[in-house]
């Protein structure tokens, strides 16, 4: 065409030279004057709000790109010359706005963090309008974010993961949780492919070129982060129905994997029923498709298309171990619980994501406990969550449950495991104990019904709490949600002849040794105590609203012991004097509940970290816990062992410590054996791996290590030769002293298997080797091109967790951090930074700070991760220095 242009122009000129004079030309319309782009700092302005979406996508999994269009009905609330929404890494090929019967072409502009602006040639007046956008985008194949592809068996499959701010990577939208409206989706895909979304298919029409257009029913109101779809050569496994309305239940799996959904299919209907029963509300969607996504990451509560990872959901027949069964039930329960806490009622902004996550984490305990009471899930989950949260809250860098979300990084950091999930759920536990179980359930049912299909805030929840339980309780609850840290409660027992005994209470913030945070902080704390003599005791409670207060005990007799956290549900550290601790620890067997004893052991550890109780003295209580009948007490006592910094011990001291641990746990572990026996119940199956791990890994018991090696050799020849319950731990133990031949055998298995979950287990085992040469070879796999870094990360994690390989891991980390971080999502980068938290000295903290500080400015969600990690390293070092001599003194006395 270029060669024709000069000729065309010449002919035109010649004609004009001989033509009669032309009449005057009509005026040419002036080019529109576009307004200057004024992107919002973070949150979108309220001047234009979506009311409905119609999204049309063409999705071909083998292609590197995708295309689509979206029509967004909006409510224009004030006259505007520019409309701001979101669209990240998308090319906008057409943009126009329909308003008042006219169509205006818009000029798209972009700003950082996915902000997309539409500049308008003239003002759009208040009223109804419709935005039309056509676009193309890139399919992610490295980070599992936005619209992403993963290959299975040589064929690519498409999935979505949008929370919190990645829907904008797949289509233009108002990508904030407060914009909760109906969606209609239409997908064009290969005719032979499965295409599914949140709601049922209403039509499927055949197109030219081997394509089909699939249209889905309009959704119930939902924010952009909950939109979901999958496309690919999936198998669909029909699994009956779920819920009171008999919603069809199906599992959407990669081709050929359907048989592995048998356990999940058998229990999912019961999970749905238990959640329905808690809320006394019917399952809210027309169907329940379970999209079995490639990895655990990607698990998500999409309405009608819940995503659950392959490691959770796909279990080979005959390999339904207790750990796998519990894991599936727990996580499936959590994601489906979000259908109420998150989908029916959604947080209005990310500062209140705790309303989704804290409440659902707490709900898990209720429904999973009812699923199988023998698991004692509520007790164990409280143990893990409360202690994890209290550990997190010991940091000056700890954030409140309700976090500020005023920057892009703060939005990404809102999903903090220690506070958003664990602390929030522990606080709800405490207030349920204060109010009563039935009262709390009615309160939460009222919260859901009042706000159904809308959004809510912390203020809304506090209002509900105030109406149901009174303003004082609402204020107390907010005092825990809105500020970081955890209280430390102390008590002085005062007994006067002829008068009721009383406690003089005091509160401050719990601050471990080496911390820079002030202890001058108060809460409105529901404090409950138990005071007793022998096995007899009485409970007394008060709401401690000031720094000090008094609590009258119900008996005039002076008690022999006082437990400062009755029921073990109080979210606070109990600070005992030596005498108080000795008295309550000497209470007769059965005087304290399992949860109370667990919290008491945790308070001992906290006292050691503060310097109130030498760790060596706390270790004196471990032998009695090792003999306890209850596995939670065994595990809680063992936490004190992990507080010992073995790197500070001499070779002889380390050997003495490990031999002592083996003596404590070895006899019971050997009596149980590595493999289950006929008649073993789930309680025994839960105890076995804990005792074996303590004796064989920490204690390095030679007989148990030899037996682990024997089992692994048999399993490598025939996987059916060893019971599945024993395999994972036996592999871990065998790797500790594994040789080159064992390493090569494992690596060959990783290369041979197409089962990603099996491969990840192998990589986790490779991360357990202690031989430096083998660990270097294993770490090379993390940065190589043979395997996906999302699968090989357990190798690096394993290297950091062992004293023998930690220095090697740190050197590797520094050499390859930039390359690894460039291939990860923001949440994965935060975890990568957190790996260095296993280090434990001021020198290590200085090295980490010097290395990472120049890098975090270039990474999303990294600054807080680094602050938390550096503080963890320094506090660990301070505690280790403080307790080093007491541990040495203790080891001199052990037999």
Image (cartoon, rainbow, N blue to C red):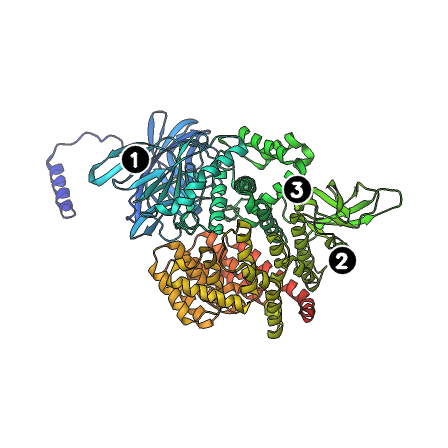
Q: Residue 864: horizontal and vertical position, in percent?
A: 55, 53
Q: Which quadrant would the C terminus be assigned to in this image?
A: bottom right
Direction right: furthest residue: 497
Q: Which of marks 2 and 3 is nearer the N terminus?
A: 3
The residue that appears at 58% across and 48% down in the rendered structure is: 380
- Spatial CA distance of label 2 from label 3 is 30 Å
Callout 3 touching callout 1 (CB < 8 Å): no
SS state under label 3: helix
Residue under label 3: 479
Q: Is residue 268 above or below residue 857?
A: above
* Location of residue 747 by image quarter: bottom left
Disc 1 target residue: 214
Within 10 Å of disc 2 (Cα), the crowding (few <14, some 14-19, many 20+) is few
Seen from the viewer's position, the closer of residues 418 and 254 is 254
2 or 1: tag closer to the N-terminus: 1
Q: Position of residue 603 (x, y in %)?
A: 68, 54
Q: Mark 2 points at which residue?
A: 578
Q: Which of marks 3 and 1 is in front?
A: 1
Q: Is 562 displayed left or right of 206 in the figure?
A: right
Q: Residue furthest front?
A: 678
Task: Judge whether residue 345 can be spotted in this image.
Answer: no
Task: Work out whether residue 74 or residue 214 is closer to the camera in this orientation and state it.
Answer: 214
| Element type at mark 2 | helix
Along the viewing direction, whichever of 480 and 286 lies nearer the viewer:
286
Marks 3 and 1, Cα distance to the nearest angstrom?
50 Å
x, y percentage for residue 672? Answer: 54, 58
Task: Please tell me how crowded label 1 is: few (under 14), some (14-19), or many (20+) other residues with Cα within 10 Å.
Answer: many
Q: Which of marks 3 and 1 is nearer the N terminus?
A: 1
Q: Which of 637 and 809 is in front in this view?
A: 637
The number of discs equals 3
The span from disc 2 to disc 1 (Cα, nearest Å) is 70 Å
């Amino acid at each position: 065409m270029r060669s024709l242009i000069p000729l065309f122009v010449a002919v035109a000129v010649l004609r004009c030279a001989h033509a009669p004079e032309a009449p005057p030309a009509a005026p040419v319309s002036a080019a529109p004057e576009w307004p200057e782009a004024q992107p919002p700092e973070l949150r979108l302005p309220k001047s234009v709000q979506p009311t409905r979406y119609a999204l049309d996508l063409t999705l071909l999994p083998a292609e590197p790109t995708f295309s689509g269009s979206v029509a967004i009905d909006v409510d224009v609330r004030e006259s505007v010359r520019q409309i701001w929404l979101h669209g990240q890494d998308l090319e906008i090929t057409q943009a126009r706005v329909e308003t008042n019967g006219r169509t205006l072409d818009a000029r798209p502009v972009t700003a950082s963090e996915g902000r997309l602006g539409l500049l308008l040639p003239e003002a759009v007046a208040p009223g109804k309008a419709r935005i039309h956008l056509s676009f193309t985008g890139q399919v992610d194949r490295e980070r599992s974010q936005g619209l992403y592809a993963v290959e299975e068996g040589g064929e690519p499959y498409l999935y979505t993961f949008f929370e919190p701010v990645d829907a904008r990577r797949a289509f233009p939208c108002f990508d904030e949780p407060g914009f909760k409206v109906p969606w209609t989706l239409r997908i064009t895909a290969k005719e032979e492919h499965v295409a599914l979304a949140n709601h049922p298919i209403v039509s499927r029409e055949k197109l030219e070129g081997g394509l089909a257009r699939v249209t889905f029913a309009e959704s119930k109101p939902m924010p952009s982060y909950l939109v979901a779809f999958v496309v690919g050569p999936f198998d669909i496994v029909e699994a009956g129905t779920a819920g009171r309305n008999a919603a069809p239940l199906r599992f959407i799996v990669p081709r050929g994997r359907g048989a592995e959904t048998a356990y999940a299919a058998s229990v999912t209907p019961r999970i749905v029923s238990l959640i329905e029963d808690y809320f006394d509300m019917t399952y809210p969607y027309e169907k329940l498709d379970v999209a079995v996504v490639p990895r655990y990451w990607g698990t998500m509560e999409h309405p009608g298309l819940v995503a659950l990872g392959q490691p959770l959901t796909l279990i080979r027949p005959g390999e339904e171990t207790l750990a796998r069964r519990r894991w599936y039930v727990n996580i499936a329960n959590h994601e489906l619980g979000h259908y109420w806490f998150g989908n029916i009622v959604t947080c209005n902004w990310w500062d209140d994501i705790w309303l989704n996550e804290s409440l659902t984490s707490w709900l898990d305990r209720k429904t999973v406990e009812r699923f199988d009471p023998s698991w004692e899930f509520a007790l164990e989950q409280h143990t893990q969550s409360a202690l994890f949260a209290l550990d997190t809250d010991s940091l000056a860098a700890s954030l409140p449950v309700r976090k500020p979300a005023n920057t892009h990084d703060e939005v990404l950091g809102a999903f903090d495991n220690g506070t958003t999930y664990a602390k929030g759920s522990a606080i709800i536990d405490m207030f349920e104990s204060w109010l009563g179980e039935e009262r709390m359930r009615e309160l939460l049912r009222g919260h859901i019904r009042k706000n159904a299909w809308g959004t809510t805030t912390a203020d809304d929840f506090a209002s509900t709490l105030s109406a149901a339980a009174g303003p004082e309780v609402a204020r107390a609850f907010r005092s825990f949600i809105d500020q970081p840290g955890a209280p430390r409660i102390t008590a002085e027992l005062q007994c006067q002849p002829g008068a009721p005994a009383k406690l003089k209470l005091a509160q401050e913030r719990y601050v471990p040794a080496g911390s820079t945070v002030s202890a001058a902080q108060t809460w409105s704390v529901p404090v409950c105590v138990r005071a007793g003599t022998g096995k007899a005791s009485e409970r007394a409670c008060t709401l401690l609203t000031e720094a000090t207060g008094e609590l009258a005990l119900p008996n005039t007799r002076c008690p022999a012991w006082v437990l400062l956290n009755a029921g073990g549900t109080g979210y606070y550290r109990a600070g005992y004097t030596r005498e108080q601790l000795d008295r309550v620890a000497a209470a007769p067997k059965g005087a304290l509940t399992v949860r109370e004893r667990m919290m008491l052991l945790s308070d001992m550890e906290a006292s050691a970290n503060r310097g109130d109780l030498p760790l060596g003295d706390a270790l004196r209580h471990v032998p009695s816990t090792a003999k306890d009948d209850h596995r939670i007490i065994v595990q809680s006592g063992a936490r004190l062992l992990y507080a010992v910094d073995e790197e500070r011990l001499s070779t002889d001291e380390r050997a003495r410590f490990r031999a002592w641990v083996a003596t404590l746990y070895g006899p019971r572990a050997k009596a149980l054996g590595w493999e289950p026996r006929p008649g073993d119940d789930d309680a025994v199956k839960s105890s076995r791996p804990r005792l074996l791990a303590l004796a064989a890994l920490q204690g390095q018991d030679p007989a148990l290590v030899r037996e682990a090696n024997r089992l692994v050799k048999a399993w490598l020849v025939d996987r059916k030769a060893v019971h599945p319950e024993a395999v994972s731990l036996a592999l871990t133990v065998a790797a500790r002293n594994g040789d080159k031949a064992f390493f090569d055998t494992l690596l060959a298995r990783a290369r041979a298997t197409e089962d990603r979950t099996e491969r990840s287990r192998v990589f986790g085992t490779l991360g357990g080797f202690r031989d430096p040469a083998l660990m270097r070879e294993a770490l090379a796999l993390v940065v190589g091109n043979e395997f996906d870094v999302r699968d090989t990360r357990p190798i690096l994690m394993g290297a950091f967790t062992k004293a023998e390989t930690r220095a090697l891991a740190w050197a590797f980390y520094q050499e390859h951090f930039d390359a690894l971080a460039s291939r990860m999502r923001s949440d994965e980068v935060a975890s990568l930074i957190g790996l260095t938290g296993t280090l434990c000295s001021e020198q290590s903290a200085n090295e980490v700070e010097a290395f990472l500080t120049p890098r975090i400015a270039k990474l999303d969600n990294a600054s807080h991760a680094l602050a938390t990690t550096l503080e963890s390293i320094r506090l660990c070092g301070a505690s280790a220095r403080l307790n080093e001599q007491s541990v040495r003194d203790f080891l001199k006395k052990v037999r």
